[in-house]
Amino acid sequence: MGSMKLTRLKPLSRHRGSPVAERRLAPFTGGAAVSCACVRPDRLAFWRGSGGSRNPDVPVARISRGGGYSYVDASFGADALVVDHARFNRILGFDDATGLLTVEAGATLGAVFNFLHPRGWYLPVQPGYPLITVGGCIAADVHGKNPYRDGTFRSHVESLELHHPDKGTFCADREREAEVFDLTCGGYGLTGHIVRAVLRAAPLPSRTIRHRLHPVDLADFPKQFTDVARTADLAHTWQDFAPRGAGFGRGFIMEGNFDPGASEAARGPFRERNPLTPGNRGSWRVPLFTPATTKLFTAAYYTLLRLGASESTQCLWDFTFPISSYRKVYFKLFGARGQLEYQSLLPVDALDEFLARVRQWLTVHPLPITLGSAKLFSGDGGLLRFQAEGVSLSLDFPYTPEGEAFALFLDGVVPDLGGRPNIIKDARLPDTVVRRAYPGYEEFRERLHAYDPARRFASGLSRRLGL
Amino acid sequence: MNTVILGAGAGLGRALAERCAAAGHDVLLAGGAPEDLRAGCDHLRTVYGIRAVAEPVRVGGGDEWLNTLLSRAADFGGTDVLLLPVGAVMEDDDGTLSAADVRRLAEVNYLAPAALASAVLPGMLATGSGTIVGFGSVGAVRGRRSHVGYAAAKRALASYFESLRHRTYGTGVTVQFHSLGYLDTGNTYGKRLPFPAMAPDEAARRVVQALGRGGFSTCLPWYWKYVGWAVRATPWVVYRKLDF
């Protein structure tokens, strides 16, 4: 399951001058691979003109693809032409008075970081791997290390340049084409190809993060965590849900604050060595996360943290991109079959009940939980966005029948408690759960169909969710 | 240092522009679609703070493109380094192309880079400095069944650069020539290849690294040198059966 093989090329088809290849694509974390028609244009003429492809070998529907790090089938589909933005990765302009940064959608977070960092700027919202693209962040409206304070990625998007085969290429922001701008941010690529974006960077308070660990107080966890997260620059937890006894949920709140007083940290540029890619994620065929080994791994990591310093400093790159280090091996430990991540955003007062139900389930149905991590959120994203008042909790586990059964269990629990699962994290999430958990589902669907009646954009995700 | 790159819109040319800019060169990007060159210049100016200008000439059809480019280069401040990654292939280039297509392949792959090099050389000889870099193909080591016109043009270019090397010996002008294997560009995307395709950025890194070091020719990647020997050494009775 989950391969990235480039397979036999048919007698070359072309789409707008770019060769079309057949590739097998799968979600980053594993799952069934599907054969897709793909193009990787490298000239801006690809975005010119309107009208669909006249080549009968090329699917009519299409979808953009960035780095391919999504955990779900959002950037590919069996009946969609996958447009790879790898060659549209340039940084086109920067206003150092306002922090407005213009980039092509294929620009990676790492490249943006390396550009902004020495100039004393940064993007407040960034997911944890540097090869994720800006376009992917916009399409999924991702969150970073402090969603409570910084919101989600769209909070830092000023404008977009979008291409739609029927509507051409046009600009959209909160005033011009506001409807499509709103739909596109967190629209999973279903409104068009994001060609370029203008982002608003923030002045960098410091290149050093002072890192502080607070042992989790399980008896008072929701309050303890929210008290820290409300005032910290960055906050999330690492928790161990492998033990079933008194240790269930033990861990640390990881608080980070910019430290202007610290001595100057390295300015970079920082490199991602031996990058983790969709192609090599599953290269360790045999999974090493079993119930027994998971307990050992998590216990060892817990002990490492407990015995280590409660305060330390980190450069911003390491804190922003924790996976860009030895930790990337974590994904390989799941082997070829991969992992599932169930990330739920729950009302704060539902967290205890959620954890109690999860603990009860796991006691009866043992399953190695390899990672648990919480973040505090605020606001209400609407539509299909993963944003609401509450606490998100991510649970990682192997993609096995037991794991699928656990995910099915959570499909019922999360909406019951007024929460919502993260659409971009679970490749088997059924549409029935999303309709139930996201009050904005119907609104998103209606607005999308009104904007694009021909439904030019589709993916495995959009088909699965009935969009 | 001013670097002029002909064929800078995509692929190796774009990667060379990035590496040169990273090394502090001011760059003139030529030969490509205007929007691609503009985006390239915007990127290089923004990221590296160097001067970057675009001249979207289309080679061929007379000398107008050459005169335009030379004028632009003069305005730019002259040419210290000339990189010539310009090239074009046609998928049905099997010896049956129309005359116009045969001329086009010859124009883009040989005549245009040779013409530009010839035009720039006198200035370099006068100052006793400068570097001219050409790019060939390992597919041109021997006549072949496919890419007939392309291979012929690249072989001509290789001969031209060998002569240029001889001509410039002892003058202070450096001439270099790189024979390229498969590069991961639009030309190879999706194709099943007998050898891995090299990332354009890696090829560009090696080319720019070699600029200050002298030496004449390389194969990129290195093992194509031995593949080329093997191809040339293969007896006709065997070679004629190869789909190469």
Image (cartoon, grey):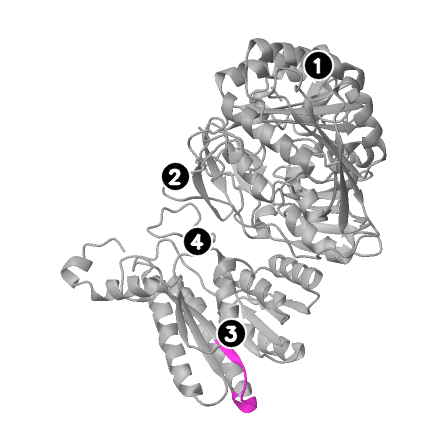
Q: Is residue A158 visible?
A: no
Q: Which quarter of the rendering shows the C terminus of chain A?
A: top right
Q: Mark 1 points at which residue?
A: A354
Circle number at residue A104: none
Instruction: Identify the subunit bearing mark 2.
Output: A
Give the mark, 4 or 3, whose residue is nearer the N terminus: 4
Q: Nearer the viewer, mark 4 or mark 3?
A: 3
Please state which amino acid type lies under the numbered disc 2: Thr
Residue at figure coordinates x 16%, y 63% from the top left: B235
Please state which amino acid type lies under the numbered disc 4: Asn
The one of A288 and A324 positioned closer to us in this rendering: A288
State if disc 2 and disc 4 touch (CB < 8 Å).
Answer: no
Q: Mark 4 points at which residue?
A: B187
Tell me: A323 left or right of B160.
right
How far apart, in angstroms, are the residues tagged by discs 4 and 2?
Answer: 16 Å
Instruction: Identify the subunit bearing mark 4.
Output: B
Kindly state the secondary structure of the residue where label 2 is placed: loop
Q: How many labels does the image show?
A: 4
State if disc 3 and disc 4 touch (CB < 8 Å).
Answer: no
Q: Name the residue under label 2.
A: A7
Give the mark, 1 or 2, whose residue is nearer the N terminus: 2
Image: A193 above or below A428 = below
Residue at figure coordinates x 78%, y 28% from the top left: A377
